[in-house]
Image (spheres, rainbow, N blue to C red):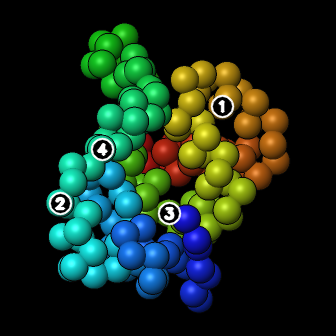
Amino acid sequence: MVMFLIGSRAMSQCGICSGAVSKYKCPGCLVPYCSLQCFKDHKAAPCTKVAAAEEEEQAQLVQPPRDFENGDESQMATRLRRQQLEAVAASEEIRAMLRNEELQAIVSKIDASATAEKDLDTAMNLPDFKGFADKILEVIASSR
């Protein structure tokens, strides 16, 4: 398959006629095509779905529910109340901190991790994350 770079986007050559840059992809097999005629030509023969491979890949990305997501009653005392969550969301200082791409990456990694508590402990050794966590705790404490 031939790829073209147009602007900042990579474009593929039509997988049917090989004569033009493709604008579309078959929803079943993702082969690139450039026109309605090429799509009709492609659909004349059955194509192979790639959905099964994509579903398997997505299944690997789904992490098992954590205790607090299962409604574990022992976790209820450690959950934030709505008022506290709103105070965190409304804090301009926290919002400013979250503009830092490195901090965003750390938070995303912790959120997606199967070992979130371990990753959180590790992140607490980083000055930017520790300052972020301290600010959240300060906002929560003042909203009680």
Q: Amino acid at mark 4?
A: Thr
Q: Which residue is mark 3?
A: 91
Q: CA distance from mark 1 to mark 2?
A: 54 Å
Where residue 48 appears, as percent x and y from the top left, is 30, 44
Q: Which residue is mark 4?
A: 48
Identify which residue is drawn at 34% across, 80% down.
34
Chain-order first, disc 1 or disc 2: 2
Q: Amino acid at mark 2?
A: Ala
Q: Secondary structure at mark 2?
A: loop
Identify which residue is drawn at 52% across, 37% down.
111
| Vertical placement of residue 103 versus 73, above or below | below
Q: Secondary structure at mark 4?
A: loop
Q: Is residue 13 left or right of residue 67?
A: right
Quarter assignment of residue 70: top left
Quarter assignment of residue 80: top left
- Crowdedness near tag 2: few (<14), some (14–19) or many (≥20) residues, C-alpha within 10 Å: few
Identify which residue is drawn at 62% across, 55% down.
104
Is there any visible trace of residue 68 in the rendered image?
A: no
**Which of the two marks, 4 or 1, is nearer to us in this view?**
4
- Crowdedness near tag 4: few (<14), some (14–19) or many (≥20) residues, C-alpha within 10 Å: few
Q: CA distance from mark 4 to mark 2?
A: 13 Å
| Vertical placement of residue 103 versus 36, above or below | above
Quadrant where the N terminus sits is bottom right
User: Looking at the rendered structure, which numbered label has been put on residue 44?
Assistant: 2
Chain-order first, disc 4 or disc 1: 4
Q: Which residue is mark 1?
A: 120
